[in-house]
Amino acid sequence: MIDYSNPKLVVETSKIEPGKIAWRSPSNIALIKYWGKHGRQLPSNPSISFTLNHAFTETTLEYSPKMGADEGIDLDFLFHKEENPAFREKIVKFLESIQDIFPFLRQLHLKIRSANSFPHSAGIASSASSMSALALCLCSLEAELFGTLESDEEFHKKVSYIARLGSGSACRSIYTHLGLWGKSSIAENSSDEYAVEYSDVNDIYKSFQDSILIVSGKEKSVSSRAGHALMDNNVFSKPRFEQARSRLSRIADHLRTGDLEAFGTIVEDEALTLHALMMASSPSYLLMEPNSLEIINAVRRFRKENNLPVYFTLDAGPNIHLLYPGYIREKVLRFMEDELLPFCEESKWIDDHVGIGPVELELE
Ligand code: DP6
């Protein structure tokens, strides 16, 4: 197990100049799903995801030496330029929980400003982009204050580890094209404690589009956190974790060879399994909506009739992610316009694609 706790990471406050760091970090869409965890945010099975591009969070972290002697986290927080006490509380708790890793946080006055590229009402899970953006800012701050984390590998490993503590899926968001989280035979450097970049991939996947069809932007009735917890007593959990492992090693072959049909079959099976696990939880619950099913059926019909590689997946919510290679974009967009957008809330969708990962933002 990695132990990042380090009491030496403290500053001499009189020598600290105020400063600012900012990162943009994307969301991601899992192909093999993380669903069930144990210990301190460790996954019950490995997962792999496409990093997205347009669905992102931008976070700015401003710091200055703290004046008072108070030992707690001193944080001002703005979300889309406004105070948000609920989010602030969540971040303070998170920062408190990692004080052994970053003891200097107690010595600084912090101001965090965060904004998403997608509307809050889009029903897009923002924890992956927001927690990865925050983890990037924190590790950059460590690097700036102490000259640590010099190699890219060291930096990414720690960022991913910290992001994971904030939200499991966030640890996969920081890599180009695909992130793999959880010990697996498909990559020797894989770990349950942080994600790694997965690059043994055919070029066709690098052009993949993700058209996110917003069936409903309503707040989920059961949070992901609660959903993971329900896996502890789900009678299917043990075979599920084994199934995820075996699907991951099979999808790794299809990612390498570019066998889109075999890839798509696994991706769709995973999405439906995720929702089946929710339905088989105790208490049971449903996050798909009637319009999610309309879209799924229409996608399968369109694929069969046109022999085109377009597949669906879902997160823990009713929205449908359409995954397909860039070269069929025009045809898929026409199909969406005609047959799928009528099932979306106010015809809403987000035009995303596989991306290169986070970028540090220039500050004036
Ligand atoms: C269905 O990462 O949101 O999107 O670790 O409790 O923050 P926490 O959960 P979260 O779970 C994501 C679940 C998923 C599948 C996935 O992204 O792998």
Image (cartoon, helix red, strand yellow):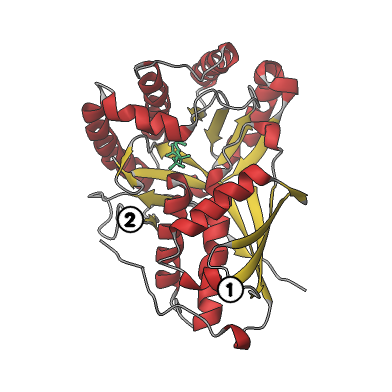
Screen quadrant of the C terminus = bottom right
* Disc 2 residue: CB within 8 Å of ligand 1: no
- Horizontal relation, residue 54 to residue 222: left or right: right
Secondary element at image label 1: loop
x then y, percent, for residue 120 = 69, 37
- Horizontal relation, residue 222 to residue 186: left or right: right
Kind of residue indicated by mark 1: Ala
Secondary element at image label 2: loop
x then y, percent, for residue 221 = 54, 22
User: Which residue is label 2 attached to?
Assistant: 193
Sequence order check, earlier mark of 2 and 1: 1
- Does residue 176 show up? no
User: Which residue is label 1 attached to?
Assistant: 69
Kind of residue indicated by mark 2: Glu
Which residue is nearer to you in this view: 145 or 306?
Answer: 145
Screen quadrant of the N terminus = bottom left
Asked if the residue under mark 1 is in contact with the one under mark 2, i.e. CB atoms within 8 Å, the reply is no
Up-down relation of residue 315 to residue 166 (above or below): above
- Does residue 290 show up? yes
